[in-house]
Structure formats: C-alpha cells, structure tokens
Amino acid sequence: MKCYLCNKPAKFLCSCVERKFQICYTHMKSHIRESNGHVFEFLPEILKNYISSKVRAELHLLKKNVMLKSSNLIGNIQFSYQQDLQGQKRELQSEYLQRMSVEISQIRETTRIELQGLNRAMESTKNKQENYELTAKLVEMMLFDLKKSKFLSPLLSRLEELVKSISPKMLQISNIEYVGQVVNGKAKGRGKSALEGGVFEGYWKNNVMDGIGILNTEMFSHYGEWKVGKQEGRGILRFASGNCYDGEWKEGKKEGRGILRFC
C-alpha cells in the first residue's frame, strides 16, 4: 500500500478526517504540524513518545477540565441561589439575582483568562524545536506558572505526573550510560547515551535504540530510523570525507533503494 500523497510505503492510517488516508511517516509528521485538531489517540506509538505530543495532549485535556469545572461551579451557584430564593420576599429576589450574576461573571472571566494562558502554553509547546532537555525544562517552567493559579492548581495532577516521567534519569545498560526517559526501569522514549566510539541521541524501547535517532562518531554520522537496536527503514549515513548514503536499511545493513554520493 502506497502513501495517498506520494509513492512511499504507507505506514499509518490518519483518522482525524472523515475519510481515512493511508500515509507515510513523512506526511504524518507534516500533517501533525499543520493540523491542530489531530486526535492524539490515533497517533502511532513512535509519535506518542514525543514529549511535545504528550504535553499538547495533556494541555488539551486540561482545557476540557477547566471548562467542565467552570460549568460545574456555575451550576452549583445557580442551584444554591434558587434554594435561597424560596420563601424570600420579592424585594430581596432582585438582590439575590444580581449577586448570582456577579459571581457567575467572575467565574466566566477567570475561565477566559485561564484558557488564554493554556492556549499560549500550547502555542509555545508547538513552536518549540523537539529537543529533549529543552522540552522537559519548558514543561517544568510551564507547570510552575500554572500552579500560581488557584483555579488551575487542583487540576494539574496529570501534568505533574508527566513532568516526573519526562525528567531525565540515568540508567546503566550493560557498559552503556543512558540519560533520558525511563519507564518501568527500562529506557523508553527519548534519551542519549555514549556508545562505543560515538554518541546516540534519539528514541529507545526496552533498553535498545528504537525509533528516530542520530548516531555521531568521529568517522561518520547516521540519522534515521532504528528498530531493536539496528538501522531499519530510511537512513542517511554521512562520512567525514563528505561521502554519504541516503536510502533504505534493514537489520543494520543497506538494503533497498538508495543513493550513494561521493565528494
């Protein structure tokens, strides 16, 4: 099955539009950048591990919870005043209704301000370059600012858990020192490690390189997709001499279509 937008092999099923499209990895990435309404639940696992995707998903949920809390508060106020109005004299009813209107207006204004702040946080997250340490630091600063709000503070438990999960952790994997995301005691998500003769920075799963990443050594650099610790899929190998190979890989070896350039 080929990508709906190009001739590359289709990897993912886009489900955020009425018609479902089979699309390749490249067009999935560009689609996510261009479509604010993309449904997080339909993202492939490799993209769900992106810190920015997780943060945007939590901020979307936080916005929904803010609106729900606002609606509940307004409903409680209306119910309370309706109870108090029973048996009151006519001249007091107007005063009660005015006080209720003021309280509801205050909640609505607070909600508007908080939603504006969350929209700014979402836009900031969207515009940030995908960089592990920078993104984790951004989320910590964002959480610190959001905690200043008495209205938001009780709703931040999920975001607090996210900050804990993306904070860099050190892990010893055989003779490799790993710094990055750790889930259930294993490297999973984005991380960095010094391998024999080089440094790898990218995505991991079950203590091995798995996902998009770049390996830099004195002799060469390799940027591309990895699976179970080996190059798999699209990859670009550049040598210090300037020569490079841009093409397909399988189980750590060049296999399939590719272009070899000599400089």
Image (spheres, helix red, strand yellow):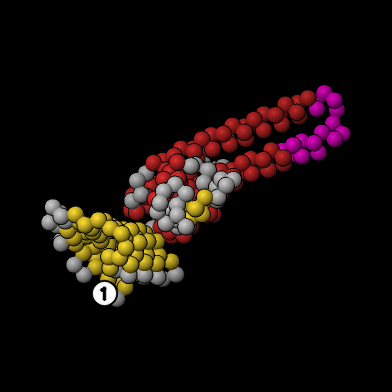
Is 69 positioned to the left or the right of 263 in the image?
right
Q: Main secondary structure of the magenta part?
A: helix
Is residue 17 among the parts visible in the rendering?
A: yes
In the displayed structure, 206 sits above or below 192; it is: below
Tell me what residue is drawn at x 70 percent, y 29 percent: 101
Is 77 positioned to the left or the right of 25 in the image?
right
Q: Is residue 205 magenta?
A: no
- Magenta stretch in the rendered image: 77-93
Tell me what residue is drawn at x 41 percent, y 40 percent: 124
Residue 118: x and y, percent?
Answer: 50, 40
Q: Residue beneath label 1, please?
A: 175
Out of 107 and 118, give the one closest to the viewer.
118
Tell me what residue is drawn at x 63 percent, y 40 percent: 70
Residue 201: x and y, percent?
Answer: 29, 59
Residue type (three-letter) at the residue carrying disc 1: Asn
- Element type at marker 1? loop
In the displayed structure, 195 sits above or below 141; it is: below
Is residue 153 among the parts visible in the rendering?
A: no
Is 252 positioned to the left or the right of 68 in the image?
left
Is 55 positioned to the left or the right of 104 in the image?
left
Tell me what residue is drawn at x 28 percent, y 58 percent: 258
Out of 255 and 158, give the one closest to the viewer.
255
Residue that protrudes farthest toward the right in the picture: 87
Residue 106: x and y, percent?
Answer: 62, 32
Q: Is residue 79 magenta?
A: yes
In the displayed structure, 178 sits above or below 2; it is: below
In the rendered image, which quarter is residue 174 located in?
bottom left
Count of numbered labels shown in the rendering: 1
Out of 214 and 87, give the one closest to the viewer.
214
Out of 89 and 73, give the one closest to the viewer.
73
| Classed neighbour count for the residue bearing mark 1: other residues with Cα under 10 Å, few (<14), some (14–19), many (≥20) | few
